[in-house]
Amino acid sequence: MERRLKIPGVMHVGIMPIPPMPENTEYVKAGPVTIGVEYRYLTLDMVMAEFKKQNRPPEEIPDPATIATEEGVSIHVMGDVGGDLKEYVRFDCLSSGPHYHYIGHKRDFPDYGDHSVVAGIDPISIGEPIPWALDRLRHRLPEMLAFAGRKDLAEKVKGNAEYEAALPEVAQAAKRASARSEEAAKAYGGMKGSAAASSG
């Protein structure tokens, strides 16, 4: 995993992030990719329940004491693999500890297997995370997809008119997601607890 860590700002290489919750995610078809925009609300109970559902081994489950409640907007960049959507880049624009993921899959990284490279978003230097994430989608997504193992998808995104045309709708979806905090909390069952930003 050492080679995957050798980019500036990387926090760690670790477990796959918790998938988006479909009931709180708006999907936008953007040419060769699909972008999911989610209002994300995670608690300790929800994180542990998801890990149990995934049958994660004990070494992949973080110490509950390190998990804190998180909420905010997550932007998921996905590509089609045999009729299924796989996530490759994620921006977790959370209320505290905002970060982003390069999500690698075993089919693209047989030596590493499924993994996530996580880097922090520094709101002091870049400002609000959501506008920064939207700017990355417009200007840097091909490079990010390539690092996530999908150079083929990266080439399809470059200069793609359908992709460019969909970005304003992604921005509007992010605004709608930001306004859904109370609704999303109710949809998640109003559970109280804590949740890890890096698990998101």
Image (tube, rainbow, N blue to C red):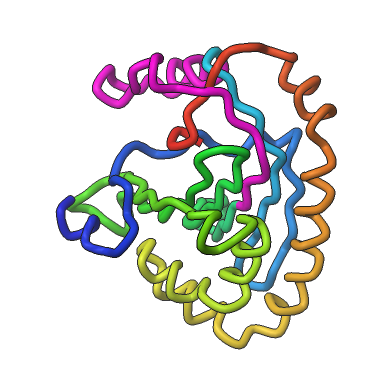
At x 55%, y 53%, the residue is: 91
User: Magenta span has 59?
Assistant: yes
* Boundaries of the magenta span: 46-75
At x 51%, y 62%, the residue is: 125
Q: 149 left or right of 82?
A: left
Q: Position of residue 164 (x, y in %)?
A: 70, 79
At x 40%, y 15%, the residue is: 64
At x 67%, y 73%, the residue is: 31
Q: 125 left or right of 173?
A: left
Q: Position of residue 190 (x, y in %)?
A: 74, 14
**Which sits in the foreground, 90 or 79?**
90
Q: 6 left or right of 76?
A: left
Q: Position of residue 117 (x, y in %)?
A: 34, 51
Residue 46 found in image quarter? top right
User: Magenta span has 127?
Assistant: no
Q: Position of residue 103 (x, y in %)?
A: 41, 52
Direction front: furthest residue:
124
**Which sits in the foreground, 77 or 11?**
11
Tag count: 0
Position of 198 relative to 10 (above/below): above
Position of 29 relative to 65 (above/below): below
Position of 49 relative to 25 (above/below): above
